[in-house]
Image: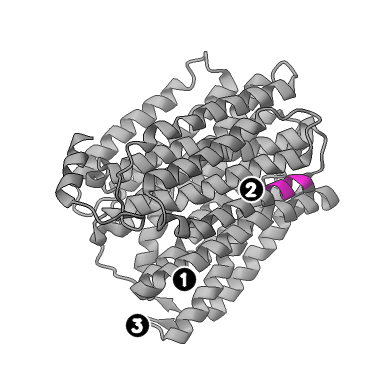
Amino acid sequence: MNQNLTIDEKSTKRSFYIICIGLLVTSLALATHLPAYPAMVGEFQLGAGYAAWMQLGFAFGMTGFQPLFGWLGDYLGQKFIVLVGFIFMAIGSAIVAISPTFWVLILGLFFKGLAGSAIIPVGFAYVGKFFSEEKRGKGLGVAAVYSVVGAAAGPTIAGIFVDTLGWESSFWLTGVLGAAMFLVIVFTVPNVKGDKSKTFDLQGVLLMLLVLIGLLTIPTFINGYGYNSVMWLPSLGVFAIALFFLVLVEKKKKEPLLDISYLSNRHFWVPSVLSIFVFLPYVGVMYLLSFFLQDIQGKPSTLVGLMQLVIFGATAVGNYFVGRWMIKFSPRFTIAFSACMLISGAVLIVFANQNTTIFYIASCLALMGLGIGLIGPANKAVVLAKANKSRIGVTTFTFSTIETTIQRVGASFAIVMFALFSVGGNGMKAFTTTTLILAVFSVFTLLFVLFIPKNVVGFKNTEVDIEGNAKEEKLV
């Protein structure tokens, strides 16, 4: 079954589609806990604020170990990493389902995060390694479709399981799926080993872990002790110090974990800032939705899943059409229009109340989904436009880490704010205040659109004067 040489085209296609099914299962499994959050904290008789700890455990597993799994994949083969990921999925799901205490449950969510960290990047790595340049776009598109379908179906399926069989059943489901995919990968996907000569940036990985620990624990400690307390300041200190040394160390590395030299280029830093202002409200509203529909409106978990299906479905539609938009419009117009759609949805949902119809909520979520579906790929196109081809992997990993971290912080931020504002028992006011903060935050996206380069490869009007573009770059 193991092969050290390249595999033939037929085997490549078969293995790719099996891995895509693995991506679908993984995306589904990572999304199943959303409708179960209120029931899970209620099981242990805890308040909504404790969901921030659940999110922290999951987020740390999901964001902190991608560079390690990436290097192991190059060293031991992608098949090995996928198998490890599905082992984590099966074990983590089982731990959550049988957890006797709340903190054991968090450990299980951490293992589920590890599963996503190991498996999700493999589809893109496989395309980059075995697909020719002219076929990579199609391959990446297929992998993205499988991932979105899984993410869209996960909350809906989980909602049905939570309402009919209890929240534990949704985790038993993902555990069984993880074990089944482990066996499928073992017997169907060949292993092609990578280059063992590449060095592993251990210092970069450790410092990145400290950066993420500091950043992700800030909202958690604010939730536990209040923003007036000094308990969250050590987390801020760890984040700042680790980030300082990370930049210092990575500048001296020949093969750094982060491409520091490209971070200052506006083809990178502008999309990174934009990601902060669009993904934080996008993810924040998704997590707030569970508490709004179930705790405030008294709706079943199944409806939460259906609303998640709406926002993910709209995101998929945006992903499908953005390629056609990019060749017709400039990067600034494309991203500004996409941002306006997301902002519109975020603003409209602020006016939701206890009697708001599901159609209104679905319409708001559809606007946000379309906006993020359009702006996400457009942002990535700007990042790749000036990236060093020999460092594409490092550049894309750096940007993906920023996006993933912002999404996890956004979820924690929304949960913490909702918990703080609902201390007096007024959940409706807490929802309105939190969504208003998220809506205002999203408006700042438009301020940074002007910093996007006027001409970017892949968008309309890419035939530009290189010298003039260089002068504009220096001016900014």
What count of labels does the image hold?
3
Q: Position of residue 40 (x, y in %)?
A: 73, 40
Q: Position of residue 419 (x, y in %)?
A: 65, 25
Q: Where is residue 343 in the image (x, y as percent from the top left)?
A: 55, 35
Foreground label between 1 and 2: 2
Residue indicated by mark 3: 5
Residue indicated by mark 1: 79
* Stretch in magenta: 303-308
Q: Position of residue 99 (x, y in %)?
A: 70, 45
Mark 1 or mark 3, earlier in chain: 3
Main secondary structure found in the magenta portion: helix
> Does residue 408 appear anywhere in the picture?
no
Q: From this view, report whether residue 274 is shown above or below residue 331.
A: above
Q: From this view, report whether residue 204 is shown above or below residue 29.
A: above
What label does residue 471 carry, if any?
none
Residue positioned 34% across, 72% down in the render: 133
Q: Three-letter amino acid code at disc 2?
A: Ile
Q: What's the distance in space between the residues labelled 1 and 2, CA to CA?
A: 32 Å
Give the residue at the far left of this rendering: 467
Mark 3 or mark 2, earlier in chain: 3
**Res 284 → quadrant:** top right
- Per the image, label 2 sits on a secondary structure element best described as helix
Nearer the observer, 144 or 189: 144
From the viewer's perspective, tell me whether residue 59 is left or right of residue 157. Answer: left
Residue indicated by mark 2: 311
